[in-house]
Amino acid sequence: MKKVDLHIHTVPSIKDANFTFDIDKMRLYVQTLKLDAIAITNHNLFDKNQFDEIKNKLNITVFPGVEVDLENGHIIVIADVDSLDKFDDQCNLLKEKIVDNKSVITYDEFISIFTNYEEYLLVPHYKKKPAMQQSILKKFGKNSTCGEVDNIKKFCVLKKQQDDLVPLLSSDVRIKKDLENFPTRFTFLDINDTSLKSIKYALKDKNKVFINETGMIINLFLHQMA
């Protein structure tokens, strides 16, 4: 099992309340929760220099990512480190289109920026506001296999619905100096390594996602719901 948090904020955008990132707090967060992999996913922007600092100071897998305002919903885009330079260029194009707190991009703009989006992990807000519209999800087709939820109950409900998206629970935390109570929203994946390929594979199969290391609690929860 690998424990992952694929939605972490480290830079405030024009759509955020201001905060100051703290690398020591990031280290403590990762160590306290015993995470195996994280993704840095700021709103509509990517700070390559900061990403490099975080990646170099943590002993776990760190993915470059971005949370995109797409139509009326949000979608997280996570890349492999091997695609870092291309991803950075794409996020710079995205940032140019988000000029105020009401800015969004269309689906056509999204695919014109992230031309190789099939290579990335796409995680739309699903059972979480602002949720991605079904009409947009259908356009992504087989490239949209998982959806982010905002609590354990929704995770369990979605996991039980076999014809629906695979659930992913993440923190959506702002890593700042005065952060005291760490969120306990994360997902366990039944994989042997934390490569993006393995994570994408797991997030296509509901039998590979859990809210704890053993899977016992979620199995009991689902049995009670039956």
Image (cartoon, helix red, strand yellow):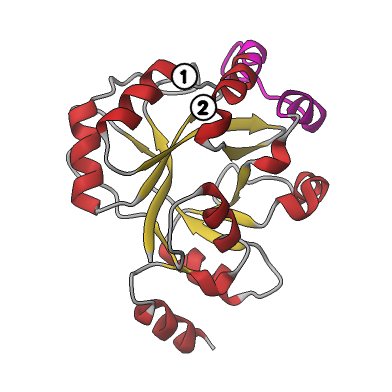
Cα distance, mark 2 to mark 1? 6 Å
The reply to whether the magenta stretch includes residue 108 is: yes
Residue hosting label 1: 13
The spot of residue 150 in percent (x, y) is 46, 53
Residue 128 drawn at (x, y percent)? 54, 50
- Is 66 placed above or below 184 here? above
Quadrant location of the C terminus in the rendered image: bottom right
Q: Which mark is residue 217?
A: none
Chain-order first, disc 2 or disc 1: 1
Q: Residues within 10 Å of mark 2 (few under 14, many from 20)?
A: many
Q: Which residues are magenta?
A: 93-114
Is residue 66 visible to us here? Answer: no
Circles 2, 1 touching at the beta carbon (< 8 Å): yes
Label 1: few (<14), some (14–19) or many (≥20) C-alpha neighbours in 10 Å: some
Of the pair 195 and 212, the residue shown nearer to us: 195
Question: Residue 184, can we see it?
Answer: yes
* Residue type beneath disc 1: Ser
- SS for callout 1: loop
Q: Residue at 43% of width from left, 57% of height from top?
A: 193
Q: Nearer the viewer, residue 17 or 173?
A: 173
Residue 212, image x, y percentages: 34, 69
Q: Regarding mark 2 in the picture, which secondary structure is present there?
A: strand
Q: Residue at horizontal 45%, vertical 18%?
A: 47
- Looking at the image, residue 145 sits to the left or right of residue 29; the answer is right
Q: Which mark is residue 43?
A: 2
Amino acid carrying mark 2 in the image: His
Q: Residue at x 37, y 20 (%)?
A: 50
